[in-house]
Image (spheres, rainbow, N blue to C red):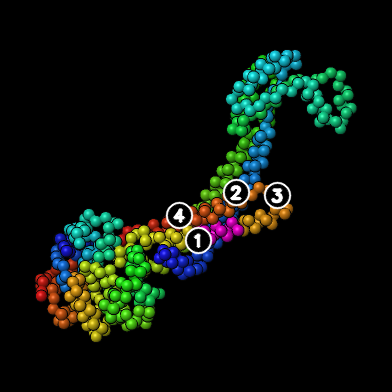
Amino acid sequence: MFVLREALIGLKRNGTASMISIGVMFFSLLLLGIFLIVTFNLFGVIKIAQSKVEIDAFLVDDIDSTAVKELKGKIEKIVGVKSVEFISKEQALKEIQEELKDVPDLLEALETNPLPPSFRIKVEEGYNNARDISDIAKKIGMFKEVEDVKYGREWVPRLDKLVKILFLFDILVGFIISIASIYVTSNTIRLTVISRKESIEIMRLVGATDRMIRAPFILEGIIQGMIGGAISAGTLYGLYILSSRFVSYYFPQNYILAGLVLFGMLLGYIGSRNAVKTYLTGGEI
Amino acid sequence: MIEIKNVSKVFQKNWYALKDVSLKIEKGEFVFIIGPSGAGKSTLLRLIYMDILPDMGEVIVAGYSSNTIRRHEIPILRRKIGVIFQDFKLLKDKNVYENVAFALEVTGTPRKKIKELVLKALADVGISHKRNAFPYQLSGGEQQKVSIARALVREPFILLADEPTGNIDPEGSKEILELLKEINTRGTAVVMATHQVDLIKYFPRRVVKIEEGRIVEDTGVRP
């Protein structure tokens, strides 16, 4: 009760500084929220793209059905392989015909079926990265019945890189935002600490524990973070509602909204703890 | 109860605020610490409530030694010691009642108990009628009474008074001294630092004289 009352008094007394602190917290968390949503959505796109990565293994023309069966079994045993589908010569032709049905003349020119039989191989989720796919492709290429192996050699590593860069960028932005918020909160709380020097001195004198002396300031920081987080969450949600009329995208609202408020509280806590740590340790202030 | 053994306190390089001071204060005693400004009176009091620790020697208060006391034990000790100052140290934005209650709130006293204790302490120092007034509405003497009430509300075994009459007119000073006497007769030890030697005439008690960080005279316990 005492702690809460003192924290609220502190917020009120340093109104302007508190507002600035909440404002910075709001702006930082809003930025972070936007970044998170962009990242979430890009990750979503990348995941869909990754699930489409497949390896085509073209076989020798004269392979018989027992050899196909045997080879299929062998490929399925390779670590990271999710599924193996056999595409016969006829099926391959059919697919081509389907794809090129707008230009029938082109196909009529074919007298024999030039397409080789093949395996269409999908990989497990954890093996979607460039290195694993190329490893798997290499292993498949070593079977003598396999003439050639093809996969999205070029865009798989690029996608891979993009994911990594995005992730690093997110961490970097999150880090910078956190540091800035902590710094500003810390300074605001420091102002409160200084403005209440007398009260702290008396608390010390009458035997208040360090914890009791610090608690109101820490709570003040947490409240600032909470308010900043809540406003940014509200703004972000408003932006989502507005923008979703024009574009549809993934917005994990519960996670984002609760996450921003909690993260704001955490930043407020760290900031204020920093402030009281430098100003309220040792016998005197 | 309080034992100061060969204590030295150095503030700046080679500047001794106290040098090899030894002093024993018994339960329920009334002691004047006199001496000119800067002689080390305040330092001595601060050592007793362990606001500072000695650089040499040992201070023992209520069983706690300055050599072994832990940081978290200091607040516990302070709850048994009342301290008042020349500048009263009242919170300007709190009224009389709240100022006294503050001392109990910050140490986690239950709300119900607070009211009872505060009203009693205010009555004891005779300032109940001003309980809703703010410090700026009070005279110096009245403010000091509030600070005494705040010091007493926890029923300390000792009251340390650092120039308690320094900011108060002669009439008010006598009144404060009377109050301290009365508190002492109820069993609380009082250690009062002052440079107003004339006050002692009204109330002859043990006098410890400090000059330049050393005890130069100690009259010993007087009845």
Measuring from the top left, give residue A180's x and y in whole percent: 51, 55
**The image quarter in which residue B192 lies:** bottom left
Q: Write down the chain letter for disc 2.
A: A
Q: Main secondary structure of the magenta part?
A: helix
- Residue that appears at 55% across and 53% down: A258
- Which picture quadrant has residue B24? bottom left
The residue positioned 86% from the left and 19% from the top of the image is A111
Mark before the other along the chain sequence, 3 or 1? 1
Left or right of residue A168, residue B70 in this image: left
Assess whether residue B197 is covered by the magenta stretch. no
B19 displayed left or right of A85: left
Comes first in the chain, label 2 or label 4: 2
Residue position marked by numbered label 4 in the rendering: A270
Q: CA distance from mark 3 to mark 1?
A: 33 Å
**SS of the residue under disc 4:** helix
Q: Position of residue B142 (x, y in %)?
A: 30, 81
* Residue A248: assigned label: 3
Write down the residue under mark 1. Answer: A224
Q: Relative to A264, is A51 above or below? A: above
Please say if B157 is above or below B133. Answer: above
Do circles 3 and 1 both sit on a common chain?
Answer: yes
Q: Which marked residue is nearer to the observer: mark 3 or mark 2?
A: 3
Q: Which residue is mark 2?
A: A36
Kindly indicate whether the residues beneath marks 1 and 2 are on one polypeptide chain: yes
Q: Report helix, strand or loop for mark 3.
A: loop
How far apart are the alpha carbons under marks 1 and 2?
Answer: 22 Å
